[in-house]
Structure formats: C-alpha cells, structure tokens
Image (tube, helix red, strand yellow):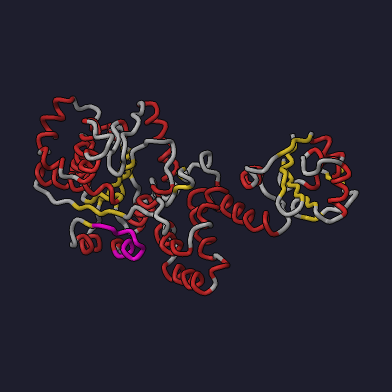
Amino acid sequence: MESVFDTLEARGFVSAVTSPELRDLLAKERFTVYCGFDPTADSLHLGHLVPVVALSHFQRAGHRVLVVVGGATGMIGDPSGRSSERNLLSRDEIERNKAAVKRQMQRLIDFEGDNPALLLDNNDWIGAMSFVDWLRDVGKHFPLSYMLAKESVRSRLESESGLSYTEFSYMTLQAYDFLHLSDAHGCGLQVGGNDQWGNITAGMDLIRKVRGKSAHGLCFPLVTTSSGEKFGKSAGNAIWLDPARTTPWDFYQYLVRQDDRDVVRLLKLYTFLPLDRIAELAGQVDSDPERREAQRALALEVTRLLHGEDVAREVSRAAEVVYYSEIKDLSDETLSSVFADVPSVVVARPELEAGIDLVDLLVRASLSSSRGEAKRLLQSGGVYVNNVRADLGARVSSAHLASPSFLVLRAGKKRQCLVRVA
C-alpha cells in the first residue's frame, strides 16, 4: 500500500499529528479515516479544499474515507477559529446545504467504485438522543477543567463576545462523532484543519475512556498567503466552489493572480500534479517569473477539478484572448463574467442581423458623445470590435458576435462596452 503519510507530508499537508507512529501504521494498515464538514452554506469554499483533496489522497492510497456532513453539529456551530457565534440554521437549510456539498465533493471523492467513500450525517446518531441521555452517556466524560483548557474555548472566553453554552457543548458532539464512527465503522483516524486540534483530541480521549482503544488525529495547515490573508478570500469574500456564487472566470482569475511566493505551495496542496512537474514549475518561477507558468497551471488544474475540463479550457483561453487577441467563440457565461464590470448596451437581434452603423453604435454605447467624435475616433484607428481595429464606414452585424449574445466594443485603450443582443 502506498504510504499516504509520506505523500501528504511531501505536499505540505501535515501540520500536526497526535502520534509519530501514525506514519508507519498508514503504510502497513488500511485505515478508515473521517473528516467532518458542517453544512453552514450551500457551497464549500476554496478554504475547504485542503481537507477534501487530502481525503482524495487517502482514498487513492487505498484507505476508506468517511465524509461526515454535520446535520447536528451544523445546527450548533463550531466556535473553533471564530471570534463570534454563528447564526443557527434551520433543518431545511441544513438539508439543502448537505445536498449541495455532496455534489461538490463528488468532483474529488469517489462515492462509488471498488473503494467507495461514505457520506454520513451525524444527526442520524445524535438527533435521536434526549438531553438527559446526552448528559448521562456523553457529558459525564468531559470534566469542566478539561474543556476550559482547550484553546478554542479559552480564546472565545477571553473575547468580547464570549461563548454561549450552545457553542461550549460543540466539542462533546464532535467527540461523540468519533466514538460512534469508531464503533460503527472501525474508524481510527480523524483529520481536519489546525483549528480542529482540540475537537479531534477530545474524540480520541473519549474513545480511550469509553472503549479503552487508541485513535489518531492529523491536522492540516490553515492556508494563508504571503501577505497574511486567508487563502480563498478576495476583498473579504469567500471564493466559492459553486459557480453560481463565484463564476468560473472569477475562480480562475483568483488563482492565476497568486503571488510567486505562494504558488508552488498551493500547487502541492490543491492539485494532483506530480511533484517532479511542480519542481519544474518552481524552476520557472525563479528563472522566468513574468511568464507566470506556475500560476496558469494552478488556475487550470484547480478549475478543471471543480468545474470540469471544458469550462477550465474555456476560461483559460478567455484569459489569453480577451486582452491580447481577437475575442471570439466564447460562451455567454464566460464573456459576461469577463466583462461583468463593463457598461453594456442592448440591441435587438433583427437590427444586428441587418447591420448597424458603427458610428451610431459608438454613440449608443456612450463611447462617443456625438457622431462627429465617433468618426474622428474611427479615423484615428482608436475603435476596436472584439479587439480587432475597425475602419470608418464599418457596420456591425451578427457575424461579429464573440459569443451567442455578446460582442465587445472598445474606444482607445481602456473604455469598453459590452453589446448584448436581446
């Protein structure tokens, strides 16, 4: 069996491990490993991708993967790594979010085949328990001093917002998840981000107290950029995996803009490119950084993983053509995303099919204040249709569409207008 620990360590996934013997155990035994995801939104974001990719590495190495979507814990809210309490979600919201999260995970984790992952909901084993059952069977194993010593609890108690009893109890729920999965599925390893260390070790302690068995934990780094910002955040907003929340174009552009200091580390964490190929790209970062080959590889590979080959190729091609060559043969979705911040004008399809005088269209698009100014601009060679220079007397027709419904006008170097066909 492939040593998945060595793979993860070489790619930068191993931040903390509860036992040094885990390396050898993972090379000798087939482990059942689990990671939990609370469905607090109808999409995962780029920050969630580290544990998802890690689970894929485990599965590819022959280990059994359990994905726990927290129908119960998602209704409570994990205080770890947060300065304030989460908004509580309804059962209907949880169910919608669970379905969306599974669809996204299926891009990277195989829930069928010879070694299928299991998608589980912890509400199935927690929801049926009464409060008295919980206090008697679970809560009695958690001394107050033990819980207060956890960093996730201590930091919140010292904050201005404090910590509610609801959040304080979260640790016991996640710990019980580990115990239940150990009993029901033979799970011996929980993985998660660095902020989950306290919750993971609480589960290990509960298994030891109640069953007299050992269990293990492995934590991944919480990825930040060289500027200290959380990776996967742009202007304070998450980069979502759902294309309805973050368009594939914006997703690709976020990745392709990564700093030279970060890109090699991100290639190791977020792609399955072989390490020797990543080493080649690292060499290009040093020798020819202006070409940004490593950034383009990162953007293409991650967009392909999440949105498919066709979408990845389209946004990659769009990134090359919209700034440097003729804009053509793109989808409406991509072109409208590329020019989302550009003013637009609407024309009727029959009118475009008949042909529109470019002088008139420049005025309608507010790229010229008058026909006379538009003519002078055309005579000077300062007008472009889909990045192709236009001449005085030109007419724009449906043959100029760069996508089924759009074409792009430009006056000078920077002023643009997106023409949409109604």
- Horizontally, is 99 left or right of 27 in the view? right
- Horizontally, is 168 left or right of 283 in the view? left
**Can residue 27 be seen in the rendering of this structure?**
yes
Q: Position of residue 161 (x, y in %)?
A: 28, 34
**Of the pair 345 and 15, the residue shown nearer to us:** 345
Task: Identify whether 350 is placed above or below 241.
Answer: above
**Of the pair 5 and 405, the residue shown nearer to us:** 405
Span shown in magenta: 6-16
Q: Is residue 109 magenta?
A: no
Which quarter of the image is occupied by the N terminus? bottom left
Q: Residue at x 89, y 51 (%)?
A: 392
Q: Is residue 14 magenta?
A: yes
Task: Identify whether 374 is placed above or below 11.
Answer: above
Task: Identify whether 63 is placed above or below 86.
Answer: below
**Of the pair 346 and 83, the residue shown nearer to us:** 83
Which quarter of the image is occupied by the C terminus? top right
Q: Position of residue 318 (x, y in %)?
A: 64, 53
Q: Residue at x 48, y 49 (%)?
A: 306
Outermost residue, right side: 393
Q: Residue at x 73, y 47 (%)?
A: 408
Outermost residue, bottom side: 287
Image quadrant assignment for residue 18? bottom left
Q: Position of residue 214 (x, y in %)?
A: 14, 51
Q: Residue at x 84, y 51 (%)?
A: 377
**Can residue 185 be seen in the rendering of this structure?**
no
